[in-house]
Image (cartoon, coloured by chain):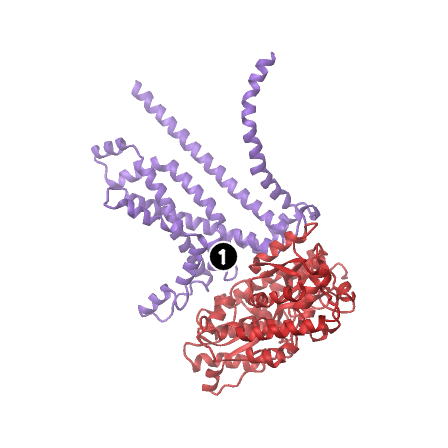
Chain colours: A red, B purple
Amino acid sequence: MLTNFNFTGAAVALAMTAGAAAANPYEPYAGTTLVVNFPAHPHFDAVMEVLPQFTEETGIRVEVDQLQYLKMREKQTLELTKRKGDYDLIAYVVFSKADYVYADQLENLAKYFMNPALADPGYDAGDLIDGYVANIGVAGGDKGYLPGATGSLFGIPFGSETSILGYRQDIFDKHGLQVPTNYEELLDVACKIPELEPGMGGLASRAASGHHASHAFLLHLAPLGGRIFDDQWNPIVNNEAGVAAAEALKTIVDCGAEGAKTFGFAEAGASFLQGNSAMFLDSTVFAGQVNNPEKSKVVGKVAWAPHPMGVRRGSQTGGFGIGIPGNAQNKDAAFLLMQWLTSKEADKAIAIAGGNPSRFSTHSDPAVLEVQPHLEVFGKALAFADPDWRPIIPTWGKINADLGTTLSQVLTEDLDIQTALDGVAERARGIMEDAGYYTWQN
Amino acid sequence: MSAASRANRLTPYLFLAPAAVILAFALLYPIGYMVYASFLDWSPSQRIGEADFIGLRNYTNLLQDAAFGESFWVTIKFAAVVVTLEMIIGVGLALLLDRNIKGMSLLRTIFILPMMIAPIVVGLMWRYMYHPTVGIFNRTIKSLGFEEGIPWLSDSTWSFIAVVIADVWQWTPFIFILALAAMQSLPRSALEAADIDGATEWQKITLIKIPLMMPVLIVTLMLRLIDAFKVLEVIMVLTNGGPGLSTEIVALRIFRTAQEFQELGEAAAMSNILLMLLMALTIGMFFYSKLQEARAARMRAAAEQEEAH
């Protein structure tokens, strides 16, 4: 893989120098040192391999402050409220988008894309995965957190993820099982597997109280046609689709491996990697570990398929984006770095090094697919990435926690699903009321 | 009054001043900050000056919040159960081991090992021991011929028991070591006198050792109680409050309110409620031990008077 990377690295260098031959747009910024804040995350580990290339081509130095991703929010909150910030570019999780944009702490990117000295006409923004852009980059449109007539761009997806179905090819072949394409088939196969392969669980899903249970539920809610709120912010999580999603989650957990009721993301992943579960439906970031013999006992046995369809297609969107803090000191150079990192060439190089690509074209690039063949299926799945599978509003943390603990009661204490979701909807209404979301009603 | 005598009278305050200043900055300022924050609607993206003042709304919200009520109840239940168990086992062990055994100092060191392990590690260790398939408990149960293991962390009753066991395992040694130290410093004369009077072992324990150790035991109890109300890491790693809210103690809820819900004001209000509860407990304990001391002093005085007659 290393030789491969070197080869592409060189290709990138060549391509970039060829483009820069006429006039070097980076020249005025050569010698600048940018300070960026990235999380410790497989995608950004891949970025670190490609980053030296940027300095070599542009003469702009980059100092990376890599933090554990849960620590990032705290540090950024401190940094962004300062008058003069230390960070020129930050990676942020989707939820921070709502807070940062609302607090006016992220630069609106329009003025950079309008600047002919900065914006590369060959950037091809249309090639960026639109579900990711809508989810992570844009704010101010529909519902406030989505694109729309009034929306504008504050960040670019970088290290984003969607949900994908991983399954054990060997087990499916052995029993002549069909790869599920819809929810009926998914639930059916999930519960058949423990019967066919005693001791093996069907689908490894998160279920632990709190964020994990809620995340697993939301994965099913969007494809099954549900939403947390309607367009007037009325909670509708307790409608038919919501109940169906909770029932799906309960079926999956009941037909899961032993101990499935307390799985978090790590445990669910481990169960699949240890060969104790036949399927895995969660973030694409997981894919990198499957063929790593140090972590996985199922090397070479896993195949991928798009997130099964319910009444519609809708896979999750999440992960990270990059944006320029309002108090950054080298904004123009930061934009150049941002544009370079998400350019076609760099996106490919990062994908080859093991990162999550942000562009459709990368998912069908022969050089990339040779090293990361699973990206082909991912690319198809990404056409259906749903930017609105969960609300990105400041009150969501609280509603999410309540949803997660209530679902945990459904899974472990057999709380009635309709009663449980009615409770969530009622409490969500209270939280939204306090936050002023019903100011314009009645 | 002459200047000299006034200066003389002010001298003690002068010497006290540095301590008072440090106290004000290091202790009262942070607490005051927290109390002030509890009246704000404050998100981490704002500086404290930008947050809206909302009076007592955080507190009224909390009183109506069923989830907080449940957390509060879980905390009280948890603290009561673990501290009772730890006191009984800790003092019991101390009574058993208060004798000259060979290698006692080594034994004592082994006994207090759990206390020295970082709580995060304790949580991880127990989480693997409670693991439904590869954990030592369920493997043992299954090797004994039982079909089903115990759902340690996936059932609300069992997970409460699981966190109680882990806490008792870690903190009983603390009580043991303090009780043992108290016991070994008891006046030997009282015990010798009891021997001469033909007291049984049980009588010695209930009538002499425990009453004489009481002041130390009360302080120990108080320290443990305060700690039990604030325990966070072990539970966070073991269950993260679940399933449902069955193990979500207030400290964990405060952490999540600040971290996940991004409501610093409400988190501060919760901390204040916890602080007030702990203050009430501490003051209660303080008065109780004062009362005990006064009673003991009265009895001593009465005894001395009798002797004098």
| Image coordinates for residue A133, horizontal then vertical, percent | 69, 70
Left or right of residue A439, residue A361 in this image: left
Please tell me whether residue B31 is drawn above or below residue A249 in the rendered image. above
Q: Tag 1: residue type?
A: Met
Residue in the image at 44% along x and 75% along y: A297
- Please provide percent x and percent y for residue A73: 61, 57
Question: Visible in this render: residue A162?
Answer: no
Closer to us: A192 or A60: A60
Q: Is residue B242 above or below residue A259?
A: above
User: Closest to the observer: A275 or B182?
Assistant: A275
The answer to which image quadrant residue A87 occupies is bottom right
Tell me if residue A125 comes above or below residue A324 in the rendering.
below
Q: Residue furthest bottom?
A: A176
Asked whether the viewer can see residue A409, the reply is yes
State the residue position of label 1: B236
Quarter of the rendering containing residue B174: top left
Left or right: residue B230 versus residue B149 is right
What's the residue at 71%, 73% (across, down)?
Answer: A19
Instruction: For mark 1, give the secondary structure.
Output: helix
Residue placed furthest toward the front: A21
Q: Position of residue A360 (x, y in %)?
A: 66, 77
| Residue at x 35%, y 67% (from the top left corner) | B139
**Residue A202 appears left or right of B4:** left
Q: Residue furthest top?
A: B2
Drawn side of residue B241 relative to residue B3, left or right: left
The residue nearer to you, when weighing A109 against A281, is A109
Quadrant where the image shows the C terminus of chain A: bottom right
Chain ID, mark 1: B
* Percent of width and height locating residue A129: 67, 74
Determine crowd level at label 1: few under 14, some 14-19, many 20+ residues with C-alpha closer than 10 A: many
Tell how many labels: 1
